Image (cartoon, grey):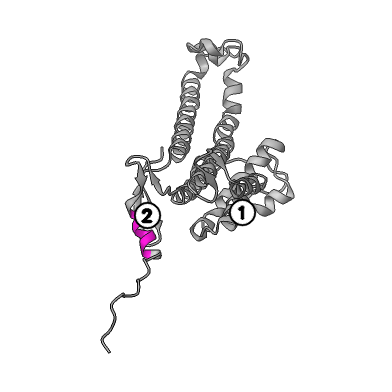
């Protein structure tokens, strides 16, 4: 699982330390659970293989492996999983357990980004009207333009373009997120078979045209870490000027506003002597 650390937001020259958004916490929690489940599933396959190999001679050829364990939920689900079938198919089971986590990763980031966008808009006075609780026309335009954009990286870039946000640090990791989205599409729409477009677009993994996407655990983790980093960077852009814990504008924001807009000096009313 991913550790949850405070996020440092910069407002002008002022550094504000705030906890991560609930959406970032949810992203990390869901992905952490998905990874933990992956390790447990791989362990279960290894245990079943080990049991079959160690007791191979004593297991009848027509016995389904699930009948050898207390697995009531599997009754009638995987009949015919004999010792030969298990040993033959176990590499494919491993690949499926790992590879299809890409779809979970892509969905987690997409959900995070939409929630991030809504939070970002709600913190902007030009984008959100607190009196009505609705987005302004400018906020609706930002939301609509980003939502209609296809591709995770492309959405982030449109957001940056329309808001003037700096995303240099995000661009350093963007290739990983693009790979995740591309593989998600291949898995979901092409049964995992790589076409020419996907083969040419992938940057951090490589699959020939016509091959099936197969990921090892370390490759999946290497793809996920930069995506989480992108979410952490985006989270720093959610800075509300209003602090609900004190019921007022954040003091550091007020100080920054005073620095940017110092009060104008009033002309002296004293008259100089002739």
* Residue mark closest to the camera, 1 vs 2: 2
Identify the image quadrant of the N terminus: top left
Look at the numbered disc 2 and give the secondary structure of its residue.
Answer: helix
33 above or below 199?
Answer: above
Provide residue 11's location: percent of width, then percent of height.
40, 57
Tell which circle, 1 or 2, labels the residue nearer the N-terminal end.
1
Query: Residue drawn at (56%, 56%), measured in percent from left and top?
Result: 163
Provide residue 115's location: percent of width, then percent of height.
53, 40
Q: Which mark is residue 253?
A: 2
Pick the front one: 101 or 126 = 126
Q: Residues within 10 Å of mark 1 (few under 14, many from 20)?
A: some
Does residue 199 appear in the picture of this structure?
yes
Provide residue 209's location: percent of width, then percent of height.
72, 48
User: In whole angstroms, how far apart are the C-alphas of marks 1 and 2?
Assistant: 27 Å
Q: Does the magenta stretch include residue 256?
A: yes
22 above or below 17?
Answer: above
Look at the numbered disc 1 and give the secondary structure of its residue.
Answer: helix
Mark 1 touches mark 2? (CB < 8 Å): no
Provide residue 140's location: percent of width, then percent of height.
62, 45
Seen from this angle, which residue lies furthest left?
273
Q: Residues within 10 Å of mark 2 (few under 14, many from 20)?
A: some
Q: Is residue 78 magenta?
A: no
Pick the front one: 64 or 119 = 119
> Over which residues does the magenta segment extend?
252-259
Pick the front one: 32 or 140 = 140
Pick the front one: 113 or 194 = 113
| 40 with respect to 102 (left or right) | left
Seen from this angle, which residue lies furthest front?
274
Q: Which mark is residue 241?
A: none
Residue indicated by mark 1: 158
């Amino acid at each position: 699982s991913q550790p949850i650390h405070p996020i440092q937001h910069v407002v002008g020259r002022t550094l504000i330390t705030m906890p991560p958004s609930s959406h970032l916490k949810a992203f990390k929690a869901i992905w952490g659970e998905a990874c933990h489940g992956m390790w447990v599933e791989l362990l279960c396959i290894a245990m079943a293989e080990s049991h079959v190999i160690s007791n191979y001679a004593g297991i009848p050829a027509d016995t389904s492996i699930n009948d050898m364990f207390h697995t009531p939920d599997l009754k009638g689900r995987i009949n015919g999983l004999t010792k030969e079938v298990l040993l033959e198919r176990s590499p494919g089971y491993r690949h499926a357990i790992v590879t299809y986590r890409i779809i979970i990763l892509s969905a987690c980031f997409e959900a995070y980004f939409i929630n991030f966008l809504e939070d970002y808009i709600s913190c902007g006075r030009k984008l959100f009207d607190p009196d009505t609780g609705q987005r302004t026309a400018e906020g609706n335009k930002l939301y609509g333009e980003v939502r209609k954009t296809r591709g995770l990286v492309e959405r982030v870039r449109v957001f940056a373009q329309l808001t003037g946000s700096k995303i240099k640090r995000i661009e350093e990791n963007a290739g990983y997120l693009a790979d995740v989205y591309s593989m998600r599409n291949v898995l979901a729409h092409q049964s995992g078979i790589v076409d020419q477009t996907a083969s040419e677009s992938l940057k951090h993994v490589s699959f020939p045209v016509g091959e099936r996407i197969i990921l090892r655990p370390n490759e999946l983790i290497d793809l996920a870490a930069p995506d989480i980093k992108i979410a952490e960077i985006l989270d720093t852009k959610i800075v509300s000027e209003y602090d609900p814990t004190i019921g007022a504008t954040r003091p550091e924001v007020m100080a920054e506003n005073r620095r940017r807009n110092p009060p104008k000096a009033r002309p002296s009313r004293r008259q100089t002597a002739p």
